[in-house]
Image: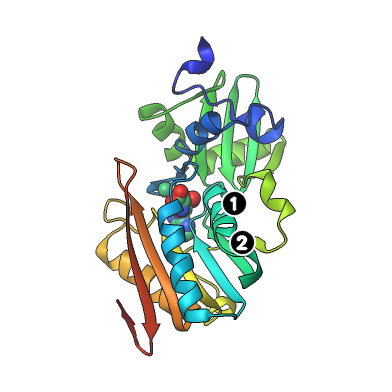
Amino acid sequence: MKKFNNFYTDVYSFFILKKNINKTMTEKIFSKLRVGSTFKTTSYNRMKDVNLKLKYYIKKIFSEKKIMLCDIGVSSGQSTLELYNDLKKQKIRYIYGFDKQIYLKIYKIKKLVFVFSSRNNLLMVEYDKYCLRYRYFFIFKMIENFLINLLDFINIKYEKSKVLTPKLDMIDKCKFFEQDIFKIKKKYFNQFDVVRVTNLLNYSYFSKSELKIAISNIKKISKENSIVLINRTKNNKNNTASLFKKKIKNLNY
Ligand SMILES: C[S@@+](CC[C@H](N)C(=O)[O-])C[C@H]1O[C@@H](n2cnc3c(N)ncnc32)[C@H](O)[C@@H]1O
């Protein structure tokens, strides 16, 4: 009975013991992992229609050329894996997946579990395998710096994990890096033929000025004539995507 509760997440079993890795559990856990003002919410096969449109334009624009793709805000990486499968594999040189949070530090003290990012941002707290939300989570979030120092001071050891689906390790053409869309490293400038950002650039997550910085960084990492795909999956699961082709100085429809 317990496992059917929406807040039963048991992240220790999921990330450390690698148990219960099934679709429903995965989606539930990722929808509760907070990253700043966003969550890692994702689901299986949510962008098939958009991927096929993208495939059409890749074929049209790049013909036989092997291309570099960048997927920003990858969550579990499942949708990146689906992008890889939906595109013709031989046309891909690499797909780079960027996300602000990819590596986790997991502390377990009896029934309490703290999930921190590698940069010590508190992402989730669980008690007795249940995700603590709303005011309980925010109390811990308010003292996240103190908390991590305390855990280290009392010598509680953490265990490391990646948030990415383990299947991705098998695909050498997919590479994942911690990169913040607001501070992308210069070495990635002018690198990509295709840049995809799905379910991240929303007014509900970021201010207008933040979104402008994100767009300017997308422009910086994309090559001349590259395709930029911005997509949002609505509550009814329909996708609303915009495809752009980069021209010198402008991103045009
Ligand atoms: C709602 S999920 C979308 C996941 C996937 N793209 C999809 O559509 O299913 C948003 C993702 O963006 C990531 N994210 C949040 N802020 C970010 C930032 N500043 N830079 C890069 N990624 C970020 C989150 O960690 C999360 O994985």
Name the foreground residue: 185 vs 150.
185
Q: Secondary structure at mark 1?
A: loop
Q: CA distance from mark 2 to mark 1?
A: 7 Å
Figure quadrant of residue 230: bottom left
Name the foreground residue: 6 vs 93.
93
- Residue that badge 2 annotates: 177
Q: Can you say whether 239 is above or below 90 in the image?
A: above
How many labels sit on residues?
Answer: 2
Tell me whether the residue at label 2 lies in contact with that at label 1, contact meaning CB atoms closer than 8 angstroms: yes
Residue under the point 54% across and 29% down: 25
Image coloring type: rainbow
Where residue 43 appears, as percent x and y from the top left, is 47, 41
Where residue 126 appears, as percent x and y from the top left, is 53, 26
Figure quadrant of residue 253: bottom left
Outermost residue on the bottom side: it is: 248
Q: Secondary structure at mark 2?
A: strand
Where residue 107 appears, as percent x and y from the top left, is 64, 33
Where residue 195 appears, as percent x and y from the top left, is 47, 69
Name the foreground residue: 104 vs 45.
45
Q: Can you say whether 152 is above or below 59 in the image?
A: above
For label 2, the crowd category at 10 Å Cα-Cα, with few meaning under 14, some 14 to 19 and many 20 or more, is some
Residue under the point 45% across and 60% down: 52
Q: Is residue 156 visible?
A: no
Outermost residue on the top side: it is: 1
Mark positioned earlier in the residue sequence (2 or 1): 1
Q: Can you say whether 160 is above or below 29 in the image?
A: below
For label 1, the crowd category at 10 Å Cα-Cα, with few meaning under 14, some 14 to 19 and many 20 or more, is many
Name the foreground residue: 119 vs 81.
81
- Residue that badge 1 annotates: 102
As shown in the figure, which amino acid type bears the numbered disc 2? Phe
